[in-house]
Amino acid sequence: SVYGLLTNCVEGTGGSKDYTIHDGTGSISGKSYMASEENMYCFNHMTENSTSGYVKAIGMLKVYRDRVSLSIHTILPVVHFDEITEHF
């Protein structure tokens, strides 16, 4: 899992959701194809309010063309900020 500041979320192609998460060491791109209730809440909250927030993204890291990305299974808003080791 990756914890960090969700800095971007957009509607992708084929029904996917594309996320950018900054964890304090850099940014990682992630893609979710699953329309679970938690994923939709996070996506809708971020796009409607046009704000960033801390999230926990659970998935699998993949390397494609020398770039690391995250295939996201679940993305949840962080409720307890003791889970975040670095705050910006």
Image: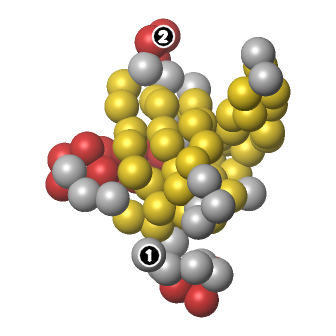
Q: Residue furthest bottom?
A: 82
Along the line of sight, which residue is nearer the eye, 53 or 74? 53
Q: Which numbered dot is residue 19?
A: none
The residue drawn where x is 58% and y is 31% is 31
Q: Is residue 1 visible?
A: yes
Number of marks in the rendered image: 2
Q: Residue at x 57, y 48 (%)?
A: 27
Q: How packed is label 2: few (under 14 Cα within 10 Å), some, or many (20 or more)?
A: few
Q: Which residue is mark 1?
A: 88
Q: Residue at x 58, y 37 (%)?
A: 29
User: Can the viewer see residue 75 in this picture?
Assistant: no
82 versus 21 height, above or below: below
Q: Position of residue 63 (x, y in %)?
A: 81, 27
Q: Residues within 10 Å of mark 1 (few under 14, many from 20)?
A: few
Q: Give the amino acid at mark 2.
A: Gly
Residue 51, position as x, y percentages in the image: 25, 57
What amino acid type should be assigned to the residue bearing mark 1? Phe
Above or below: residue 10 compared with residue 58 = above
Query: Which quadrant would the C terminus be assigned to in this image?
Result: bottom left
Figure check: 16 above or below 5:
above
Residue with the most extreme left position: 49
Q: Residue at x 58, y 79 (%)?
A: 86
Q: Are marks 2 and 1 in contact (CB under 8 Å)?
A: no
* Place of residue 36 in the rendered image (x, y in percent of width and height, measured from the top left): 52, 41
Please give the residue where the numbered disc 2 appears in the rendered image: 14
Question: Horizontal placement of 66 versus 84: left or right?
Answer: right
Sequence-wise first label, 2 or 1: 2
User: Relative to the observer, which residue lies in front, 60 or 41?
Assistant: 60
